[in-house]
Image: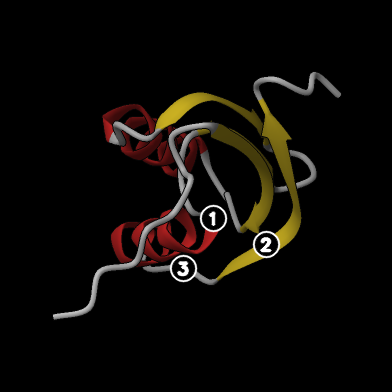
Amino acid sequence: MKYIVEDILTTICCMVMRLNLDCNGCCRKMRRILLNMKEVESHAMDKQQCKIMVCGRFRPSDVAIKVRKKMNRRVEILEIQEVNEGNEQ
């Protein structure tokens, strides 16, 4: 078994995703999914531009895959920013 050591605990990621949010039901479902993810610390949703910003201690690909599986919709990662706690950018 191969163990991969990553420095996730000291790195905070902010990721912007594009996801088709047609109706208020889709927005509620997306909000519920994000609130149930332990890795996600905060999120913001823009329904008009179909963008979701997520911040927390996670790997961006893992969050995108979880959202894709639970929403059953195509997820596009637009931007990823990694912020170290020691270096405030």
* Residue at the spot 71% in from the left edge and 33% down from the top edge: 83
Quadrant containing the C terminus is top right
Q: Amino acid at mark 1?
A: Pro
Q: Amino acid at mark 2?
A: Ile
* Residue at the spot 53% in from the left edge and 43% down from the top edge: 23
* Residue at the spot 54% in from the left edge and 55% down from the top edge: 60
Nearer to us in this view, 39 or 31: 39
Horizontally, residue 78 falls left or right of residue 5, namely right
Report helix, strand or loop for mark 1. Answer: helix
Q: Residues within 10 Å of mark 3 (few under 14, many from 20)?
A: few
* Mark 2 and mark 1 residues within 8 Å of each other at the beta carbon: yes
Which residue appears farthest toward the left when viewing the image? 1
Horizontally, residue 72 falls left or right of residue 23, namely left
Q: Nearer the viewer, mark 2 or mark 1?
A: 1
Report helix, strand or loop for mark 3. Answer: loop
| Label 2 sits on residue | 77
N-term mark: 2 or 1: 1
Nearer to us in this view, 40 or 67: 40
Q: Position of residue 42 (x, y in %)?
A: 53, 22
* Mark 3 and mark 2 residues within 8 Å of each other at the beta carbon: no
Q: Nearer the viewer, mark 3 or mark 1?
A: 1
Q: Residues within 10 Å of mark 2 (few under 14, many from 20)?
A: some
Q: Amino acid at mark 3?
A: Arg
| Label 1 sits on residue | 60
- Residue 53, quarter of picture: top right
Up-down: is 14 above or below 79?
above
Q: Position of residue 48 (x, y in %)?
A: 77, 40
Horizontally, residue 78 falls left or right of residue 63, namely right
| Label 3 sits on residue | 73
Q: Position of residue 24 (x, y in %)?
A: 49, 34
